[in-house]
Image (tube, rainbow, N blue to C red):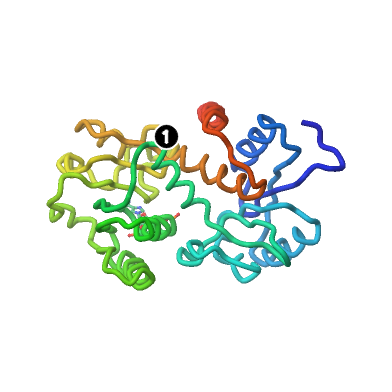
């Protein structure tokens, strides 16, 4: 692809942005489908978020991704916000609309699509969520939105789990999220839970760390989903696999948040064939990094 006078521009604002895989995802898709679009990163300070959005608008930038630490701070500068992103309280994708940008949360749309691609649906299911940080909050909203039967939100600090449960239950007017201490996992009496690991435990370089060590816990699961993708097989996934349970990492979630954003910006559908090819390129890139 040659950059010329008609090239559309998209980009990422955050701090830091140097480690981001998003340029690889978007520029590879553009190359593969022959779309004259370029994607670059912008390191933006906290004070600069509003000006960055305004500047992007003035320059006619097609769309933006937003990463840490600006995912909530960017909201006041949007013209519109998607209802799901509003409930989550975080936006990672800005799409150009009349008079400004509309904010979406494709992190969570990406997780939904990655789960579906792995034949995991949340409707009527019992879910265990480990950890109660920002990613967990978004995943709790997704579970409520998708009609999960019950979500057991386990965290080391009960108050953080309670805060998420309270706000999500209130937003969906249903007692769906049940906050629990991490140490209370033995009280879970089911045997078919979808377990989503949302904490940073096990992230490289601490690759041998796992949030719950007891092998009996993993016997209760139908499937384990780790949002970490580095290492490719986390200690949590190994624990699942040791008792014969399938487990997936967060790489397809990372890819699909990009694909969802790409589709919103370009009003197109990225085929499974292209997505699979980009997945392999991304996997290779992360191995050699
Ligand atoms: P995010 O990036 O999603 O916002 P975060 O704020 O770093 O993530 O949150 C990480 C989650 O992992 C938190 O729920 C944290 O537990 P606390 O709420 O008790 O702090 C959890 N976590 C991190 N390290 C942990 C550990 N060693 N054992 C148990 N939980 C841990």
- Whole-percent x and y of residue 136? 38, 56
Measuring 73% from the left and 41% from the top, which residue is drawn there? 38
Tell me the quarter of the image containing the N terminus: top right
231 with respect to 52 (left or right): left
143 with respect to 86 (left or right): left
- Whole-percent x and y of residue 251? 46, 38
107 with respect to 94 (left or right): left
Q: Is residue 238 above or below residue 62?
A: above
Q: Would you identify the image quadrant in which residue 56 lies?
A: bottom right
Secondary structure at numbered mark 1: loop
- Whole-percent x and y of residue 271? 56, 34
The residue identified by callout 1 is 231
Callout count: 1
Q: Residues within 10 Å of mark 1 (few under 14, many from 20)?
A: some
Question: Mark 1 CB in 8 Å range of ligand 1?
Answer: no
Measuring 46% from the left and 52% from the top, which residue is drawn there? 108
Measuring 67% from the left and 32% from the top, which residue is drawn there? 33
- Whole-percent x and y of residue 173? 33, 72
Looking at the image, which is closer to me, 108 or 52? 108
Query: Which residue lies most toward the front here?
Result: 268
**Ligand 1: quadrant of the figure:** bottom left
Tell me the quarter of the image containing the C terminus: top right
């Amino acid at each position: 692809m040659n950059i010329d006078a008609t090239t559309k521009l998209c980009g990422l604002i955050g701090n830091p942005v140097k480690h981001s895989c998003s340029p690889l995802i978007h520029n590879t898709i553009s190359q593969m489908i022959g779309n004259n679009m370029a994607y670059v990163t912008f390191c933006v300070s906290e004070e600069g978020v509003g000006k960055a959005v305004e500047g992007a608008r003035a320059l006619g930038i097609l769309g933006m991704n937003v990463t840490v630490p600006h995912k909530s701070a960017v909201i006041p500068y949007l013209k519109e916000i998607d209802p799901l992103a509003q409930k989550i309280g975080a936006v990672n994708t800005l799409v150009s609309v009349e008079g400004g940008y509309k904010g979406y949360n494709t992190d969570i749309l990406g997780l939904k699509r990655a789960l579906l691609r792995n034949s995991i649906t949340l409707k009527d299911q019992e879910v265990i969520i480990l950890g109660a940080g920002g990613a967990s909050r978004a995943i709790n909203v997704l579970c409520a939105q998708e009609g999960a039967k019950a979500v057991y939100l386990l965290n080391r600090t009960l108050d953080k789990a309670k805060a998420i449960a309270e706000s999500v239950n209130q937003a969906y007017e249903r007692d769906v999220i049940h906050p629990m201490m991490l140490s209370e996992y033995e009280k879970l009496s089911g045997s078919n839970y979808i377990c989503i690991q949302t904490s940073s435990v096990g992230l490289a370089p601490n690759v041998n760390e796992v949030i719950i060590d007891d092998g009996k816990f993993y016997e209760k699961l139908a499937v384990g989903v780790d949002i970490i993708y580095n290492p490719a097989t986390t200690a949590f996934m190994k624990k699942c696999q040791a008792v014969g349970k399938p487990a997936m990492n967060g790489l397809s979630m990372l890819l699909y948040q990009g694909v969802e954003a790409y589709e919103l910006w370009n009003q197109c559908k990225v085929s499974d064939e292209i997505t699979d090819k980009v997945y392999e390129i991304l996997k290779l890139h992360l191995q050699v990094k």
